[in-house]
Amino acid sequence: MMKKTLDASKYLSTRGGIKSVDFCDAVMMGLATDGGLLVPAAIPQVDGTTLDSWRSLGYLDLAFEVMRPFVGNALPPATLRQLIRDSYATFDTTDIVPIKPLDGNNLYLAELYHGPTLAFKDVALQFLGNLFAEILRQRGGCLNILGATSGDTGSAAIHGVRGKAGIEIFILYPEGRVSPLQERQMATVPDANVHCIAIKGTFDDGQRVMKQIFNDLPFKQKNHLGAVNSVNWARILAQVVYYFWGAFRVQEQSGSHEAIQVAVPTGNFGDIFAGYVAQRMGAPIARLLLATNENDILSRFFNTGVYAKGAVQPTLSPSMDIQVASNFERYLYYRLGENALQTKGLMKEFEQTGSITLQGADPVFAAGRGDTSATLATIKKHFENHGTLLDPHGAVGVAVAEANPLPGCKTLCLETAHPGKFPAAVGQALGNDTLARHDSLEQLKSLPLRKTLLEPTVPVIETFIIQTLAERS
Ligand SMILES: *Cc1c(COP(=O)(O)O)cnc(C)c1O
């Protein structure tokens, strides 16, 4: 039995400025209207009997059990089940997230890349796309998603909503500055509700224009604009599932009932925050090992207590090239004992000074940094010694896991992308980039690109959105 079931389906802001809302409202709200992030009013506690009954479930049934208390009455149980089924029917394996031994000893690997765009963001964005469509079906209306991407998020978001009734998606990306494969994953999608905008500028130009358009409130409301960024609670929730799944599979495969360590390559703190929720619910997780590349604001925080911004440095693991982690505020809220007033104060201090300091440590977390040379060496070593080809993001996690074993525990390393998405990095590690291939990426090479090249200014992009929506209605 679960306790606190009701509370878990009501959502509050980390800054305390909203009345509680239900799960569907939280999903549609994205960011809380007071500038904070939405969190459940309580995290459900899973007791030992329930936990044991979950061990034998397949991925889809487990997802239903983990998500249900957070959804509450906002969706009928049969609808939630169907959403989960539809979301993972696009994966190329019935295990959804296969868990395998990595080094024949203490390390295991969670393959999170079996979705349509070959990165872990599919686990959440396939679910979010179906959830948006279901909420629109219930409530009527439409949703026009606007996003700016430097690569992975845009394609996962597009694949989450392609072909869905009532939803259009506009993705801005910098022309000539995403990898050719990444562009193909976005601009070859043939569905008429997908609109790729290649801007004549940088990623920052795209992000700036997107923020300006979201701040143009009359435009935003009139055109039903919505976002799919990683602060959406539904994205976190879908990711909580594989922490339970992974811990069960590692215990099963190793024959040990010890709780495990999970090593998580981190950028926006979304994925590892989902692990924290799972740990607090009672998943058999002894420690979360946070791994960053050279952009190490988060690993510095867990090692020193100081959360201080630096300048973003491009690396081989671009999806982790982030300095201000948008989900960190959720962790801060729990670290401060769910005190919204203190959270708001510290976030304000961070916005003003670029730095905050917390006293004490959190035994649930350890952290380390895997730099470029460690990433390359790890890819090479695991390919040569164990025949496993890691992508550069997963390699950061494995490098940090090898440097930070937890005595008596197995470590599950999250592999967040298929190596075929990053042939240049794999080539640099192995001296041969033909090893990093995936059939679905090869097929894209012969498809036509559908994109519009535009100047990154608010009037140009807004006009394009208005004209496109008029043509589509
Ligand atoms: C987004 C991403 C990450 C980082 O995930 P966060 O939730 O932002 O911490 C890691 N690896 C890959 C491949 C990604 O696309």
Image (spheres, rainbow, N blue to C red):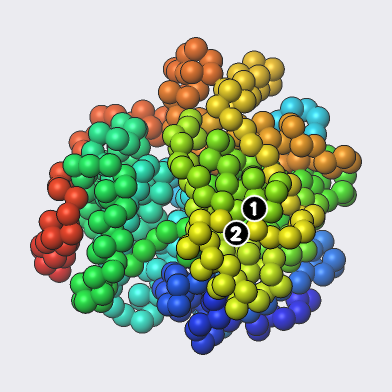
Q: Is residue 91 left or right of residue 247?
A: left
Instruction: Give the amino acid type for the residue marked by disc 1 in the picture.
Output: Val
Residue for point 89% across, 41% down? 408
Residue 130 or 432: which is nearer the viewer? 432
Residue for point 74% across, 32% down? 403
Residue for point 50% across, 72% down? 36
Name of the residue lying farthest toward the top? 431
Q: Please provide percent x and percent y for residue 117.
A: 42, 43
Q: Is residue 446 above or below residue 471?
A: above
Residue 364 or 235: which is nearer the viewer? 364
Question: Looking at the image, do the residues carrying marks 2 and 1 touch, with CB atoms under 8 Å apart?
Answer: yes
Residue for point 74% across, 31% down? 402
Query: What residue would you read off at disc 1?
Result: 306
Instruction: Give the amino acid type for the residue marked by disc 2 in the picture.
Output: Ile
Name of the residue lying farthest toward the bottom? 19
Between the C-alphas of marks 2 and 1, the distance is: 6 Å
Q: Quadrant of the C terminus?
A: bottom left
Which of pointers 2 and 1 lies earlier in the amino acid sequence?
1
Q: Please provide percent x and percent y for residue 255.
A: 86, 42
Number of numbered tags placed on the structure image: 2
